[in-house]
């Protein structure tokens, strides 16, 4: 069983609608489809947890408040639809998407959408998963926040340092 976690939270980016960054759990033995989400996690925009098996992912449901579940069709220990059924009672308000290897518009994708609805999922997504896909699932403008917060070309982490430097400079001028 493969277990990986990427969790990097920037305190200033944590000021989102519910006072924290969205928490996303990916349950998929193939992590390569989530590189864009992993990059967003490294920048502190999402709290990302990766699991390859349903049993280890269910343990997360009891420990953290998850905003979105991205579930592959086949996991290491069960099918994605079986996992979705087990997750129903524990997921609360979290959004759930089942992954499809088929592009939208194909007959296979339509079958996957029907199976996802029956399993209680909110959406069917195809790899690779982008931040826009996650925005649509959660209804949160993650990329828009990034553009607004980093409009000057600097990280928001640099703002407190700049403000701190100004406060020190004013204190030296007043005292000196």
Image (cartoon, grey):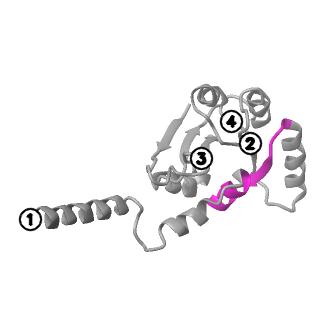
Q: CA distance from mark 2 to mark 3?
A: 13 Å
The answer for how far apart the CA atoms under marks 3 and 1 are is 46 Å
Residue found 44% across the figure and 49% down from its top: 11
Give the residue at mark 2.
96
CA separation in Å, label 2 and label 4: 15 Å
Q: Is residue 58 magenta?
A: no
Q: How far across and how far down the image is residue 101, in percent?
A: 75, 52
Residue 158: image quadrant is bottom left
Under circle 2, the secondary element is strand
The residue lying at 74 percent from left, 42 percent from top is 96
| Secondary structure found at label 4 | loop
Q: From what the image shows, is residue 71 above or below residue 40?
A: above
Residue marked by disc 3? 22
Residue under numbered circle 4: 75
Instruction: Tell me what residue is drawn at x 60 percent, y 28 percent.
Output: 56
Q: Is residue 128 magenta?
A: yes
Residue range in magenta is: 119-137
Q: Nearer the viewer, mark 4 or mark 3?
A: 3
Q: Of callouts 2 and 3, which one flags the residue occurring earlier in the amino acid sequence?
A: 3
Q: CA distance from mark 4 to mark 3?
A: 23 Å
The quadrant in which the N terminus is found is top right
Percent position of residue 132, x then y: 66, 61
* Dot in front, 2 or 3: 3
Q: Which residue is mark 1?
A: 176
Task: Name the front one of labels 4 and 1.
Answer: 1
Q: Earlier in the sequence, mark 4 or mark 1?
A: 4
Mark closer to the chain start, 2 or 4: 4
Q: Secondary structure at mark 3?
A: loop
């Amino acid at each position: 069983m493969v277990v990986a976690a990427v969790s990097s939270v920037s305190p200033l980016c944590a000021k989102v609608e519910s006072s924290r960054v969205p928490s996303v759990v990916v349950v998929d033995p193939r992590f390569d489809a989530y590189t864009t989400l992993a990059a967003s996690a490294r920048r502190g925009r999402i709290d990302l947890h990766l699991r390859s098996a349903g049993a280890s992912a269910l343990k997360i449901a009891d420990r953290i408040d998850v905003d979105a579940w991205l579930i592959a069709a086949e996991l290491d220990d069960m099918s994605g639809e079986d996992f979705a059924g087990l997750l129903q009672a524990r997921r609360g308000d979290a959004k759930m998407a089942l992954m499809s290897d088929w592009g939208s518009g194909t007959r296979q994708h339509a079958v996957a959408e029907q199976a996802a609805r029956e399993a209680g999922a909110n959406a069917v997504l195809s790899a690779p998963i982008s931040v826009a896909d996650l925005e649509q699932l959660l209804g949160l403008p993650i990329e828009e926040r990034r553009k607004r917060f980093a409009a000057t070309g600097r990280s928001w982490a640099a703002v407190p340092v700049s403000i701190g430097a100004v406060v020190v400079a004013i204190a030296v001028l007043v005292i000196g």
